[in-house]
Image: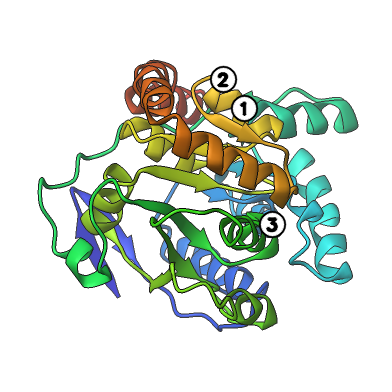
Amino acid sequence: MADEFQGVRLKYFSTVSKAGFDTLLHSLKATFDIIVHNTADVVHIHSGANSIWAIVLRCAGKRVYITQFAMDWKRDKWPWYGKLFYRFTNYLTAYFPTAVVFDNVFTQEYFEKKFKRKYYFIPYGSEVKQPPAESPVLDKLGIKAGNYILFVGRFIPDKGVHLLVRAFETVKTEMKLVLVGGSPNPDSYESEIRQTKDDRVIFAGYIYGDDTNFLMKNAFIYVQPSLIEGLSPVILTVMGLGTPLLCSDIAENKFITNDNAVHFSSGDSNSLAEQFNYCLQHPGVIREKAENGQKDVLTRFNWDSVSEKYLELFNSKK
């Protein structure tokens, strides 16, 4: 199945719904399609977990570039064999591609120190299409602009959704907590989160496109409680929209936010609850941080610059 978007040819491959195996099977199909139909000279692979296919593609004469994200082997969602697989693929990522790109300097530093090699750092961009002035999504969810707290993402342990719900349950406010998303493979973790008895928590399900950006743009504050990240596209999007942000104080988050967000101690729901109350009591402060943050990320994380760096790398024939 093929499609096209703004001059880019898209091709889709089916896969299984088993966590951990879905990406591998999908990437396997894409790899062999590229080789059999000779549809590319340069292949850009996302996630070092797919680096096993870099070997096959290099043998087929392709130039292969891998973008490695966070230190995925640290994520609690993976069983021991999943973490072992990630550590194994670190070696493949380090040595087999034409070049390796990191979206954050912290994982880059880890790889450079461990493998005694130099790699590239190219971040994401933060420019976001501004949402429409109006959307029916607020009425559908029964909320009002500026009067809700928002999270968008997967319901998995390292995103810290359990900390978010636990902290919010202790905060006295009439605002709603809107949780957009879910687990790609629903499990006991998501079930436990949904057991909250706080009727202020709204499980909105999956929402996409303009409606998602509209919710981000009009939130009182966006919360990113993650325990592990690379360079978070969600934080870049939220800050690019000029929305106040409350996030965990992990180094990867603070690399983006500087002092332009409110931070809480990672993994500590009590600290998150304290900062919730601070934000509710100081709306002017968080709006000022958001305005400064928007200017900062649009300067430091610019998609034109990102694209130019990738094109320069792909054309370098390294």
Element type at marker 3? helix
The residue under the point 45% across, 67% down is 181
Calculate the distance from the C-alpha at mark 2 to the C-alpha at mark 3: 22 Å
Q: Are marks 2 and 1 in contact (CB under 8 Å)?
A: yes
For the view shown, which residue lies furthest in the front direction?
A: 172
Identify the amino acid type marked 2: Asn
Identify the amino acid type marked 3: Asp
Q: Position of residue 288 (x, y in %)?
A: 37, 20
In this rendered view, identify the residue nearer to me: 227 or 232. 227
Q: Earlier in the sequence, mark 2 or mark 3?
A: 3
Regarding residue 69, the answer to whether it shows in the image is no
Q: Position of residue 317 (x, y in %)?
A: 53, 27
* Residue tagged 3: 158
168 up-or-down from 198: above or below: above
Q: Position of residue 4 (x, y in %)?
A: 21, 59
Calculate the distance from the C-alpha at mark 3 to the C-alpha at mark 1: 17 Å
* Residue tagged 2: 258
* Residue tagged 1: 254
Give the left or right position of residue 139, taking residue 163 as reference. Answer: left
Calculate the distance from the C-alpha at mark 2 to the C-alpha at mark 1: 5 Å
